[in-house]
Image (cartoon, coloured by chain):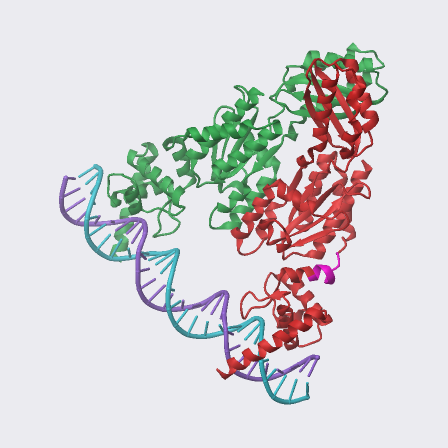
Chain colours: A red, B green, C purple, D cyan
Amino acid sequence: MANDRRADDRKSDTRHLDGRQLDVRPLDDRKLAVLRAIVQDYVGTEEPVGSKALVERHSLGVSPATVRNDMAALEEDGYIQQPHTSAGRIPTDKGYRLFVDRLAEVKPMTAPERRAIRHFLDGAVDLDDVVARTVRLLAQLTRQVAVVQYPSLSRSTVRHIELVALAPAKVMLVLITNTGRVEQRMVDCPGTVGETVLADLRARINARAVGQRLPDVPELLEALPAAFEATDRPTVTTVLATLFEALAEQNEERIMLAGTANLTRFGHDFPLTIQPVLEALEEQVVLLRLLGETGDAGMMVRIGRENAYEGLNSTSVVSVGYGSGDESVAKLGVIGPTRMDYPGTMGAVRAVARYVGQILAES
Amino acid sequence: MANDRRADDRKSDTRHLDGRQLDVRPLDDRKLAVLRAIVQDYVGTEEPVGSKALVERHSLGVSPATVRNDMAALEEDGYIQQPHTSAGRIPTDKGYRLFVDRLAEVKPMTAPERRAIRHFLDGAVDLDDVVARTVRLLAQLTRQVAVVQYPSLSRSTVRHIELVALAPAKVMLVLITNTGRVEQRMVDCPGTVGETVLADLRARINARAVGQRLPDVPELLEALPAAFEATDRPTVTTVLATLFEALAEQNEERIMLAGTANLTRFGHDFPLTIQPVLEALEEQVVLLRLLGETGDAGMMVRIGRENAYEGLNSTSVVSVGYGSGDESVAKLGVIGPTRMDYPGTMGAVRAVARYVGQILAES
DNA sequence: CCTGGCACTCAGGACAGTCGAGTGCCAGAA
DNA sequence: TTCTGGCACTCGACTGTCCTGAGTGCCAGG
C-alpha cells in the first residue's frame, strides 16, 4: 500500500513536468534512436518490443533500464503505446509519422531490382498493358495492395479528334490524347449531316484543339458554331456538346488494383480489419479521392487515422504522381497496414513511378 | 469391453449390407427430406445440425432416434459428415450436389425484387455501365462475390468498321459490334494511303462484313487484296491483318468483379480459406476459364472440389450465360462458400442474367 | 545522468473438471 | 419390418486455477 501511493505521487509529478518540457524542447537524439529501433523491430517481428530485446538487437550503448526511461517519455508524448501492461511497446500513428518524417530514408532499389522493373515494364504493348503491368509489379515488389490510376484526361493534351459519319444522322466522335488514351462517343444529330460540313467541322476543331490541354478545349471552341450556316448549327452544337462531355468526364477516371490477396497477411484481428478495406477498395470514388490527395510535388504518406476515409483508418497509403515528362498525369501507390516497411515501400513506389514515366515518355 | 465388441460387430455388418443396397436402390424419401433439412439448417445457422434440433425445426413426423438412423445412412453414403464425434452433421460436397440436383428448386425472385433489378439496370448508359451495374447488383443480391464477363467478341456480329486516316501513313481502325463494344487499333501502313483507296477499302470491307459474326469475317475478306492495284496491296493487307488481329483477340475478354468484401463472411478458419480465393479472383485467366465451363444451355453449379482450380476448392460457383437474344454472348455468376443458399443464389443469377439480356436486346 | 536491482503486473499456456449436445445401439412396441 | 424411447458413451466448449515469463516502473547508488 505504501508502495502504491508513493508510485502514484511520483508518477504524476514527473508526468506533468516532462510533458511541459517535451512539448517545447524536441526529443533527445537517443530517444529518437530508440523510436527508430522500436519501429524497425516491430515492423519486422509484428510483436510488441521490450526494452531488453531492444538493447540486444541494436547497439544503443546503454542499458535496458535507460531505454525504459526513454520509452516512458516517448509514450507520454504519444509516439508509442503499450497494448497492455507487461507487454512491449508498439508505435502509434504519431510515432510512425515521426519515423517517416525524420528518421527514415527512402530505400533505393538495388540494381537487380531496377533491372527487373525495367524489364517487366518494357514488355508492355499499349497503355492498358502498361497500367496492368505496373500495378502487378507494384503489388509484387511491396507485397501489398497496389493501386494505379490511368493517366488522367485533364492533364493530357489532344492529339487528334476524329469525326466519322456512320449513318445520315449518326456521327462517331473519337478523341485521342497524347497519353495514348482513346475515347469514343456516338452522337445522334438533330438532322442529316453532310460530309462537307463534317469535314469542315473536323478541320476547324482540330486546328484549334490539337496540342491543347483537355480542360482548355471547350473555351477555344466556344465560338465555333457561329462560323457555320444557321441550318448546320444544331448539328455543330450537338457534336461539340458531346465532345465537351467526353472532355469533362474526368470522373470516368479508372483505377486498377492488384495484390488484394496480400491483405491476408494483415494482422491477427482479421475479419474486422480487412472487411472495411475490401469495401474501400471496391469504391473507385474512394480510391480516386485518396490518390487525388497526393500532392503533385512529392510522395505522400498517409498513416492510419490520417486517412480521411474511415475504413482505411488502420492502413497506411503511400502514393506519388507519375507522368511522361516533369508533370504528373496520374497517381499510383500502395495500401498496407500501418505497420509497414516505409523506407522499402517508398523506394519501390518511387522507382516504379519513375520507370512508368519513362515508358510513357518513350511511347 | 463387451460393449465395444458387440457394437463393432453389428456396425460392420449393417454397414456392408446398407452400402450394397444403397448403391443400387436410391435413397429413401425420408432420408432425402432429412438431407434437405440438414442443408437448409446448416446454411442458415452455419453450425453442425443434430437430430434433435432437426425434428424440432422441421415437421418430419418421426422421432430423433429415427432421424439418427437416417443420418447414419446418409453419412455412410458420403452425403453428410461429422466434423468430430459428438457434433452434428454438415453436408459434404456430394450432399450439396444431391441437394441442388434433386431437392432444391430455383427460388424465383419476388415481384419487388424484380422491379428493383429492372429499375437498377435500366439506368445504364452504355455497355460498360451495364456490366458495372450488373456486377454490383448481383453482389448485392446474393451477398457474395459476383463476376460478369463482358459480352464476348466471338459471338457478336459486326455493326460497322471504320477507317480513318490520321496521318499519311497512319490509319485508325475502329470496330463496332452489335453488343455496343468498340475496339480501335492504330495501323502503321507501309506507304502513304490515298483517301480514295481508303474509302474504297472501307466500303468493300463493310459491304462484306457488316452483320457477320466476328470469327467468320476473316474468311469473307480473304480475297479482298486481289481487288486492288498492286501498289495498294501492301496497305490493304496490313490493314486487314490488324483487323483480323482485333477480331481474333478474344483473349482480351474482360471480366468485372464486385463484392469481394463479402468474403469476410466466409467462415471461421479465415485467412486460410480466403487467401487462395482472393488470388484466384485476381487471375482473369482463372475466372475466364471458370465461366467458360458454363454450358450455353442452362445454369452451371460447381460445388467445392468440383472446381478445377484448386484455390476454389472450398467455394461454389453458380454461373449462367446471358445474351441479347436466344444466344448467350457471355457469362455471369457468383462465387461463394459451398455453404450457400443455392436456391436463392440460383434465382438471383438467373433473374439478373435474364434482365441483362433484355437490356442488351433493347439497346 | 546512467545502471543494477527489486517488486509488481499481467497475458498466455497448461491443466483439470464440468456441462451438454450429440451419437450409436438395443430392446420393445406398432 | 420399422419406429421409438432409453441408455451409456464421447468429446468439444467452457470455466477456473495455477504458473511462468516478459516487461514494466521505481529507487538507491555509482
Q: Position of residue B63 (x, y in %)?
A: 24, 43
Residue at the (81%, 20%) spot, across then down: A227
Between residue A333 and residue A362, name the one nearer to us.
A333
**Residue A268 visible in the snapshot:** yes
Q: Is residue B233 above or below residue A108?
A: above
* Residue B28 position (above or below residue C25): above
Residue A253 falls left or right of residue A213: left
Q: Nearer the viewer, residue B271 or A333?
A: A333
Instruction: Indicate left or right for B154 with C8 as reference.
Output: right
Is any atom of residue B299 visible in this view? no
Residue A39, placed above or below residue C7: above
The x and y percentages for residue D30 are 68, 88
A264 versus A283 height, above or below = below
Q: Residue furthest top?
A: B227
Q: Nearer the viewer, residue C8 or A291?
A: A291
Q: Is residue B347 left or right of residue B121?
A: left
What residue lies at 31% left-to-right and 36% top-to-bottom? B33
Residue B205 % position (x, y): 72, 14
